[in-house]
Image (tube, grey):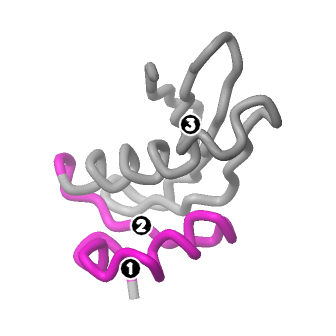
Amino acid sequence: MNITQGETGSGGFYKAQLEGHYGEMTYSRTSPRLIIIDHTQVDDALRGKGVGQALAEFAVTQARTNGWKIIPLCPFFKAQVERHPDWQDIIQK
């Protein structure tokens, strides 16, 4: 699975490609050190293949590497945060 990151004016995205299909997680940037993950979408053909989980883990790694905090508004990402207590270090309270 290949995951890439892109930046847009006030936010960005993480995009995963697998077997010719895509999954994407989008975020808004509220400051240089704070992002809001607001949406995750995975093509139906990739459901159950761990693409959403891989995107969430990539976001967590990026936050740790770059010293960011995340506000989890996306229901999928919020559910992943609840399953991973070890991610609390990057969650904005």
The first of marks 1 and 2 along the sequence is 2
* SS for callout 2: strand
Q: Is residue 13 above or below residue 40?
A: above
Q: Which amino acid type corresponds to the residue marked 3 in the rendered image? A: Phe
82 or 4: nearer the eye?
A: 82
Q: Residues within 10 Å of mark 2 (few under 14, many from 20)?
A: many
Mark identifier at residue 92: 1
Q: Residue at x 67, y 11 (%)?
A: 20
Report crowding for label 1: few under 14, some 14 to 19, many 20 or more residues within 10 A (C-alpha): few
Q: CA distance from mark 1 to mark 2?
A: 6 Å
Q: What is the x, y in percent for residue 85? A: 31, 82
For the residues labelled 3 and 1, the Cα–Cα distance comes to 19 Å
Look at 45% across and 28% down and name the residue there.
Answer: 5
Q: Where in the figure is residue 70, as x and y percent of width and height?
A: 42, 66
User: Outermost residue toward the right?
Assistant: 44
The residue at 30%/72% (across/down) is 87
Image position, residue 90 (x, y; %):
29, 70
29 to the left or right of 22: left
Residue 84's disc is none
Tell me, yes or no, whether the highlighted magenta stretch contains residue 69.
yes
Where residue 70 is drawn, which disc sits there?
2
Q: Is residue 87 magenta?
A: yes
Q: Which residues are magenta?
A: 65-92
Q: Considering depth in this image, is 49 or 40 the residue closer to the camera?
A: 49
**Within the image, what quadrant is residue 15 found in?**
top right
Residue 58: name its quadrant: top left
